[in-house]
Amino acid sequence: MRSSPSPQPARRWARAERLDADRMAEALHERTGVRLTVEGPCPGGQVGAAYVRWPDGRRSVLKWRPRARVADLVDGPIAVSEALRAAGCPVPATELVEQVDHAVVTVQELLPGSTLDRLDAHGLEQALALNRAFAGRLADRPDIPAIALYLREDGPGFCLHEPLRRHGARAAALERWVTAVGAAHPPAMEGEDAVHLDYHPGNMLAVDGTLTGVIDWDGAGRGHHGFDLVTLRFGVHVEGTGPGVEDRLDEVLDALPETVLRPAWAHMSLRMVDWSIRHHTPADVEHWLDLAARRTD
């Protein structure tokens, strides 16, 4: 009697590396002589950040970016944040940057406020106003790299295509659509605006309903500021909103040029579905596939 074949085990995809704050603080001490005291993890985030205290008592935020080089962060994301700070935007200063093995470790200014658990109509209008302030901010900085979209090839630890191809019919169809959009558009964003790349309520700080800062600029670069509004639309889909917020944001997206909206939607669809396949549950994957389907064809 022939036995039936054994089922194949589920593919174990690579997961994001997490910050070991104590180890990174010790590495900074060895390299710079600065002794930072780790106080505990910051809430939210996908790869981790931690509150630290300087010897003089000041508090800051310790972050890291794996598989990165100091020069690339200084010439890209840090240059973007400094350009925005010079224009008066509420962006944290970078206080220390150091290469630690394959990662870049940064210490950033701790801005006042706490992250938004829920974006209401008042918060959305503030986020839209701040986003408009990003427009044209890099007009005199052609040296800052444009943000790659990764619609036809894998990104560095995110926007991976193979997980979608292997996950199921819906995800595979989405990946084919993303690749087709990539074939019809440039591989990187066009424009002279500052782009955050992860502009969602979890990266916005507020005090008593007033926006006090935007954090986590590690992926920032050059492009069209409308891209961040697509990111925000995906962000409110999971983090919750007040009445009318999603409809208002959809109206704003409808007014974006198709040359911006279409590749941005493809990027975020790929990014969120891939991440959920590798880190979250099948229900989460369906959650993002449902949103992605609203603007695919």
Image (cartoon, grey):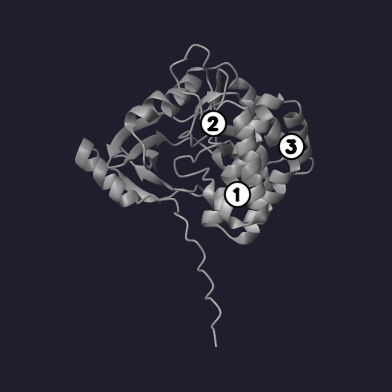
**Left or right, 40 with reference to 149:** left
**Image depth: mark 1 or mark 2 in front:** 1
The reply to whether residue 265 is visible in this rendering is: yes
Residue 261, x across and y down, in percent: 68, 30
Q: Mark 3 points at which residue?
A: 121
Please report contact status of discs 1 and 3: CB closer than 8 Å, yes or no: no
Q: Name the residue under label 1.
A: 273
Q: Mark 2 points at which residue?
A: 196
**SS category of the residue bearing label 3:** helix
Q: For the residue carrying disc 2, how many other residues have a C-alpha within 10 Å: few (<14), some (14-19), or many (20+)?
A: many
Q: Which amino acid does label 1 sit on?
A: Val
Q: Which amino acid does label 2 sit on?
A: His
Residue drawn at point x = 39 percent, y = 30 percent: 73
Residue drawn at point x = 55 percent, y = 39 percent: 203
Upstream in sequence: badge 2 or badge 3: 3
**SS category of the residue bearing label 1:** helix
Q: Quadrant of residue 36?
A: top left
Q: How far apart are marks 1 and 2 (CA)?
A: 20 Å
Residue 37, x across and y down, in percent: 31, 47
67 shown above or below 7? above
Upstream in sequence: badge 1 or badge 2: 2
Q: How far apart are marks 2 and 3 (CA)?
A: 21 Å
Q: For the residue carrying disc 3, how many other residues have a C-alpha within 10 Å: few (<14), some (14-19), or many (20+)?
A: some
